[in-house]
């Protein structure tokens, strides 16, 4: 039996979700749901750990998913995807699947993703200025993925 790479699994699930959302003309709502979920999952990884735990049965996971979907007011297509991910035991890859969905949306809508590292947080004005300058330079719509880097101060040795 041929082993499928994790990257292939992630892209397959993301593409299937995107295709289902397109078919139901729900891409905008699913994208909104996914952005919300990505923020939540990045802040609290315990949700994914619970849902990826093989000790919990599928019905318990589906109940938990339904509760999350109800509280977050997720679209039916988003919940269907989460249910498929749960049924196939792929919750360990949930965050990358959701991020890949966003990448697909960006590509299909003419956006270029740019990763920017900064030693300190940028103000809203700085982010807007950076995005505007990048869009002008690249002649494309830009999504800026900001990340902070930690720069440690040099240690001083006692004399």
Image (tube, rainbow, N blue to C red):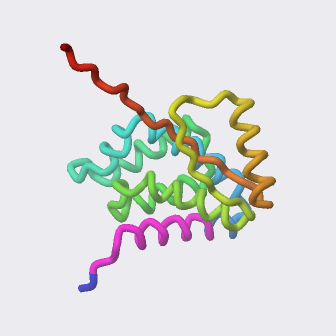
Count of numbered circles on the image: 0
| 1 lies above or below 45 | below
Q: Position of residue 144 (x, y in %)?
A: 64, 47
Residue at the outermost bottom position? 1
Indicate whether 135 appears above or below 24: above
Q: Is residue 147 left or right of residue 48?
A: right
Residue at 34%, 38% in the rendered image? 46
Query: Is residue 32 something that shows in the picture?
Result: yes
Q: Nearer the viewer, residue 3 or 119?
A: 119
Q: Nearer the viewer, residue 102 or 134?
A: 134
Q: Quadrant of the C terminus?
A: top left
**Residue sitting at x 70%, y 33%:** 126
In the image, residue 61 lies in the stretch drawn in magenta: no
- Residue 4 counted in the magenta span: yes
* Position in image of residue 70 (x %, y %): 55, 39
Please name whichever residue, 156 or 115, is drawn nearer the observer in this view of the structure: 156
């Amino acid at each position: 039996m041929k082993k499928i790479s994790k990257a292939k699994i992630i892209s397959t699930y993301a593409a299937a979700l995107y295709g289902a959302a397109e078919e139901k003309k729900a891409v905008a709502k699913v994208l909104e749901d996914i952005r919300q979920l990505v923020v939540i999952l990045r802040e609290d990884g315990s949700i994914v750990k619970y849902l990826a735990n093989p000790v919990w049965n599928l019905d318990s996971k589906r109940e938990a998913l339904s509760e999350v979907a109800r509280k977050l007011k997720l679209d039916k297509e988003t919940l269907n995807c989460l249910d498929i991910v749960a049924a196939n035991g792929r919750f360990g890859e949930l965050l990358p699947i959701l991020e890949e969905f966003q990448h697909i949306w960006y590509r299909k809508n003419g956006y270029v993703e740019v990763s920017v590292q900064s030693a300190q947080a940028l103000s809203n004005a700085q982010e807007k200025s950076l995005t505007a300058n990048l869009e002008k330079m690249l002649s494309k719509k830009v999504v800026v993925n900001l990340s902070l880097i930690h720069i440690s101060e040099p240690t001083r040795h006692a004399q």
